[in-house]
Amino acid sequence: MSEHTVSPRSPADLRGVAVVGSGRALPRTRVSNDDLSALVDTSDDWIRSRTGIGARRLAGPGESVTTMATEAARAALNHAGWDADQLDLIILATSSPDDLFGTAPRVQAALGAHQAVAFDLTAACSGFLFALVTAAQYIRAGSMCRALVIGADQLSRWVDWTDRRTCVLFGDGAGAVVLEACAPDRDDLLAFRLRSDGSRQACLTLAHRERLRDVQGGFTTEEGGFHPIAMNGQEVYKFAVREVPIVLAQVLRDADLEARQVDWLLLHQANQRILDAVAERFSVAPERVLSNLESYGNTSAATIPLMLDEAVRDGRVQPGHLLATSGFGAGLSWGAAVLRWSGPPPSGSATAEPPST
Ligand code: COA
């Protein structure tokens, strides 16, 4: 157990939120830009220069949101030294569930987290940040002590593999963190802001496919099904480079910090040009900007915890480090937070990343 150990229900002096462990999981199959060039009219040079992406992992047979989320969750629980049955809450951020009724309960069952309530939360690529803040509110309210927050997506299910404008961008994966009640003066969530703008929803969609079905007996209903992902790339790009700096500046101000005081900029991994533009706006040096786009592309709700875990395990992010983080994407939805990493120092050995095939 971590040093933040508390009793099952937290008293008023334990209403802070400590981030005490992380984990990640990736599918085995690696697909390079050159592999995609055989599918659609694109090239490694075009994809790298416009996005920074070199490859992505795609879930294959036997892999799913449930399996990736469970692996990432197990790694995060091990990292924190927790047993699954100590969890009160599991929130799974995903837009590509295995079951529209909820995938989090499958993860709960797979983990054996018998005491935990488990539910999905959908906010596209902002999902992990929204879920993290949601879990923190339960802890701050005193109704939950130990929470697992997972971001997991398998957007390869919903990509049109004939559309070069979108198929090169996305990959599959999962990341997770565990949160624990702690003394308020040690709270690791220093500030957050969440935003939505449904009037710009059409920029990026995975929309229900309208198809009518005549049911015997005289009434008509819609049939279930979705269109593949559709995106206005330029509008999404402009949205990100405009809104992310604004919301980041707000959370830094809320936390009474300047950008130079945070150790790492941890943005949703959508596009290296977006990362560079935001970093430049805050005069953050490239070596303080976390990026794994080259290896994994945009894994939607998974990018932030996946990147965090990688940087924690390889020793870049150390206990006590401050991270300015921002998620953004479909909805449109976006937000930012200032976080402190309180988890164990790097162990290096407990990652759930399989070798690629
Ligand atoms: N390979 C080769 N050419 C491609 C291509 C690809 N994979 N995708 C698009 N093109 C072509 C277009 O068809 C267009 O050709 P045309 O001029 O003959 O019509 C040309 O490249 C320019 O397209 P455009 O959409 O203007 O490119 P861009 O410079 O805006 O780059 C994105 C496209 C998608 C990389 C960029 O808009 C972007 O990153 N947007 C943000 C997307 C994002 O992050 N989404 C997720 C948010 S969570």
Image (spheres, rainbow, N blue to C red):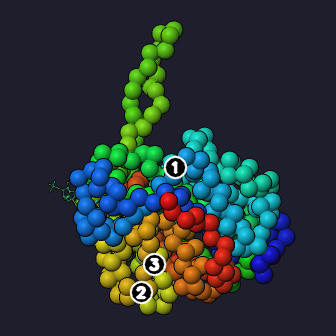
Q: Is residue 101 left or right of residue 96?
A: right
Q: Is residue 14 visible in the rendered structure shown here?
A: no
Task: Pick whichever of labels 3 and 1 is earlier in the sequence.
Answer: 1
Quarter residue 237 falls in: bottom left
Quarter residue 160 falls in: top left
Q: Secondary structure at mark 3?
A: loop
Residue at numbered disc 3: 290
| Callouts 2 and 3 close, C-beta under 8 Å | no
Q: From this viewpoint, which residue is outermost toward the top? A: 217
Residue at numbered disc 2: 287
Instruction: Relative to 345, say whether 122 is above or below.
Output: above
Distance from mark 3 CB to nearest ligand 1 atom below 8 Å: no
Amino acid type, residue under disc 2 in the picture: Glu
The structure residue drawn at horizontal position 44% and vertical position 50%, both measured from the top left corner, is 156
Residue at numbered disc 1: 60
Distance from mark 2 CB to nearest ligand 1 atom below 8 Å: no
Instruction: Relative to 178, say whether 63 is above or below.
Output: above
Residue neighbourhood size for the residue with mark 1, other residues' Cα within 10 Å, grouped as few (<14), some (14–19), many (≥20): few
Cα separation, mark 3 vs mark 1, equals 27 Å
Depth check: 134 or 155 in front?
A: 155
Name the image quarter holding the N terminus: bottom right
